[in-house]
Amino acid sequence: MADSIIQDHDDEVDRRGFLRCMAWAGTGMAWMAGSGILRSAPLPRLGRAADARLATGDFVFAQISDSHIGFAKDANKDVVSTLQAALSRIQALPVAPDFLIHTGDLTHLSKPEEFDTLQQVLISAKVGQVFYVPGEHDVLADDGRQYLERYGKGTKGQGWFSFDHKGVHFVGLVNVVNLKAGGLGNLGAEQLAWLEQDLKGRPSSMPIVVFAHIPLWSVYPEWGWGTDDGAQALGYLRRFGSVTVLNGHIHQTMQKIEGHVTFHTAASTAFPQPAPGAAPSPGPMTVPAARLGSLLGLTDVTFVRRSHALAIVDQTLG
Amino acid sequence: MNVRTGIYALLIASALATAPALRAQNAPAGQETRPPKPVAIDIDNFKFGIVSLDVAVGTTVTWTNRDDVPHTVVSLKKVFKSPPLDTGDHFSYTFANAGTFEYYCSVHPRMTGKIVVK
C-alpha cells in the first residue's frame, strides 16, 4: 500500500527531489530525504524502494509513532506485537535506516513499566539509535518528569532538541505540555525563542526536518488536532527551501504541501482513529481484526543528496 | 470580689453563652444537617457529561471516565486536580466553599466544564 509525494520546489538552486511515502498499516513510515524539489507521484511499493540506489551522503531514516504501550482495549489488545511487526518492516527495508524517530505517545498511561516494555522491545529489535519527542500520554501524571529522566538527556526545556545528520538539520519539538484550557497543542514562548535561535544563521538551502507529536498544522481543531502557536514556528521555517514536518497523534497518515513545506502525519503502531469528523469523538476505532494491519503503519524517509529530495514512504502493517 | 475576678467571671459567662449559639448554628435543635445530594458526571466521547453545573456548598461531585483513553479533571486555579483517569476510574471532590470552579482535561484541553457553588 503506497502513496507518495514528489514535490517540486523549483527555485534558483538546482534542486530536484521527491518525497515518497510508504505506510504499513500497523507499522510506521519511512522517509527518503533530499533537498529542494519535492514532487507528488504515486508511492512506490515497499519492494521497489530497493530500486532507489543511494549515493554517498544519501540516507534513510524511519518514523514510528503512537505505540501506546499499555493500551489493551478492543481496538488492539496486543500493541506490543504490532509494534514488533512495524520494527520488522523497518529491518526489512532495502536500505538500513540511519536512525529511528518516535513521534510520541510511547506509552498509554506514562507508567514506568510501559516505558520499560517499549525500551525492551526496541533493544531486542536492534533498531539502533532512536530519537524521541513526547506525546501527551507520556507526560500524564508528573508534568513529564519521568519522560525527561529517561529521554531528556541532552535536550532543552521539556525535551526539545536539534541535531545535524549528513547535511540535514533535524529539530524535535514538544507541544504536549502546559496545555491551556480550551486550546490545542502548545509550544510556548521559551521553546519558540529557542527554535528561532536554533535556525538563525543556517543557510536557507539546508534541508530541515521538524518533528513533534501533535500536528503543527491545523488538521482538525474541533478534535484538538493542531498546535495553537504552530504558525509562529512555521514562520521561522519559511525561508528554507526544503522543510519536512513529521507528526503523529492522529493515528492515520495525512499529507499536505504548502510552499516549500511538506507536512506528514504517521500512522500509529497501536490502533487507528477515525478520519476528522467521521465519528462523535477521536477515540480508538475498533475494526475487524483482518483490517487492523491495514490501518497501522510506519514511515521511512530517504534523503537523496544529488536530487535534493526527501522521499517519504508510508507502509501499512497489513 | 475584686475587679479582676469580676472580669474573669464575665469572660467565662460570655464564653458559655457563645458556645451553645455556635452549636445551634451548626445543628439547629430538632433538625439534622445532611450534606447536599452528590452529583455524578460521566466523561464520554471526549466531553464532560454536564458542562455547567450549579450545586450547593458541601456537594460532592464524582467524575467517571467512560472513554477508552485517559482523561483528567483539573481546576484552572489548581483547586483540585485528578490523577490520570483510565477507563472506569473516577475522581471525587467536595466543594466546601462557594464560587465558580472552571476545569478542563489537561490531556485534551478542549474538554472544559464549570461548577458553580452557591
Image: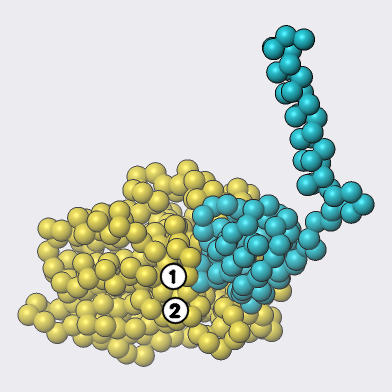
Chain colours: A yellow, B cyan
Picture coordinates of residue A264, whole percent (x, y): 38, 77
The image's mark for residue A221 is: 2
**Position of A234 compared to B48: left or right?**
left
Give the chain letter at badge 2: A
Are marks 1 and 2 in one subunit? yes
- The correct choice, above or below, for A148 with respect to A132 in the image is above
Kind of residue indicated by mark 2: Pro
Picture coordinates of residue B47, whole percent (x, y): 61, 74
Q: Nearer the viewer, residue A289 or B44?
A: B44
The image's mark for residue A184 is: 1
Give the chain letter at badge 1: A
Spatial separation of the CA atoms under disc 1 and disc 2: 7 Å
**Position of A16 compared to A179: left or right?**
left
Q: Earlier in the sequence, mark 1 or mark 2?
A: 1
On the image, which quarter does residue A271 sit in? bottom right
Viewer can see residue A150: no
Residues marked 1 and 2 touching at CB (< 8 Å):
yes
Judge the density around disc 1: few (<14), some (14-19), many (≥20) Cα neighbours within 10 Å: many
Q: Give the residue at the far top of this rendering.
A: B2
